[in-house]
Image (spheres, rainbow, N blue to C red):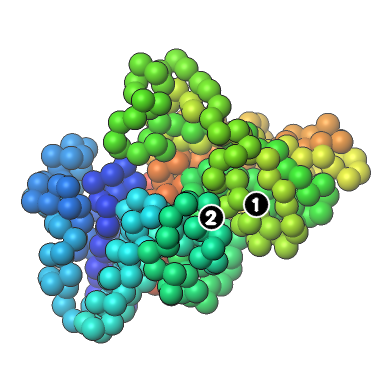
Amino acid sequence: MNAPIKAIIIGASGYVGGELLRLIAGHPKFELAAAVSDSRAGQLVGEAFGHLSQVLSGTRFVSRKDWLNEIEDGSNLALFSAAPHGASAEVIAAVIAASEEKNLVLHVVDSSADFRYPEQSAWESIYGAQHGAPELLSTFTCAVPEHLSTISTAHVGHPGCFATASLLAAVPLMRSGLTEPDVFISGVTGSTGSGRIPQVGTHHPERNSNMHAYKPLVHRHSPEIARLVSVASGHETTVHFVPHSGPFARGIHVTLQARTKEAVSEDQIRDLYVSAYANSPFVEIVSTTPKLKNVVASNMCHIGVATDGDSVVVMSAIDNLVKGAAGGAVQWMNRLWNLPETSGLTAAAPGWT
């Protein structure tokens, strides 16, 4: 495949959209064809994202109704959706319908929650709205790339950022059968996880030098995490999840605890994770505890483990906007197009952020 693959980003003016723009700008095979944002149509990308003004000089946001007319019939198209939950499915459905008329070869990766459940009823009960494209649910797979060696669908619904960090921590342990099926997860996320539109809880004077839990044990990501852990591990798992709002902009740190069925050693647990992720270029098992500054702005996940013999602790650190959203989406899109999984994703974490 010599010709570039045209990349389209829906919801390109949000935080995840901005990270997708940054990653696509440096990708060897994806070529940005449209940064779609109705609210900023006609504006320069550099006006919304000053750090991208040089690499995307002259590039403007386009409206949802205009970009598809510029795509040549028969093109290869990589569609990334960073549209909000509940709105993404309808937009994607319209693009898929139009792509069939234009004979486009299309793969979609959706970063919203709209294609994280295979059942319409499950999604609607959790999000309290009617699904925008239930007829497409069977054409999407939801998983992190590290837990699925092959994929039979044309499109992917990327797990949420909390789910990504939790899945990478939980699945090898649940597969092993060494612990009880109940896992207790405490996660801390940065303010960018709340999106670009300011809210009371993410306003700087409230967030800075502060930390608090929210929606303990009832957060809507809990059933998502439980379902995906159960599917990937083959063992029914109960998840007790408490998310926290942290006083930093980027990153997620997750701590998982589980009770062992019999005494285990730390070396035994560490070897379990080293083996599980031996062929996963974006997961590193660290000898100490993982730190956010070592992964922020990268597609890496750092995992650390500890045990007292009777219980196990697994710690997972990722960047919520990269591995938990845009980077994970690019990783999936690489695989959907049979490109090297690491394409466009190997830049090191900057450190000292």
Q: Secondary structure at mark 2?
A: helix
The percent position of residue 14, horizontal first and vertical second, equals 28, 44
Query: Which residue position is annotated with label 1?
Result: 226
Q: Is residue 138 left or right of residue 23?
A: right
According to the image, label 2 marks what residue? Answer: 125
As shown in the figure, which amino acid type bears the numbered disc 2?
Ser
Position of 242 with respect to 194 (left or right) is right
Percent coordinates x, y for residue 149 in the rendering: 58, 68
The x, y position of residue 308, in whole percent, is 83, 31
The residue under the point 40% across, 43% down is 321
Q: Residue at x 82, y 40 (%)?
A: 259
Residue 348's quadrant in the figure?
top left
Q: Residues within 10 Å of mark 2 (few under 14, many from 20)?
A: few
The image position of residue 83, as x and y in percent, is 32, 53
As rendered, which of 253 and 344 lies closer to the eye? Answer: 253
Question: Which image quadrant is residue 73 in?
Answer: bottom left
Q: Residue at x 46, y 62 (%)?
A: 115
Could one spot residue 292 in this view of the protein? no
Give the mark, 1 or 2, whose residue is nearer the N terminus.
2
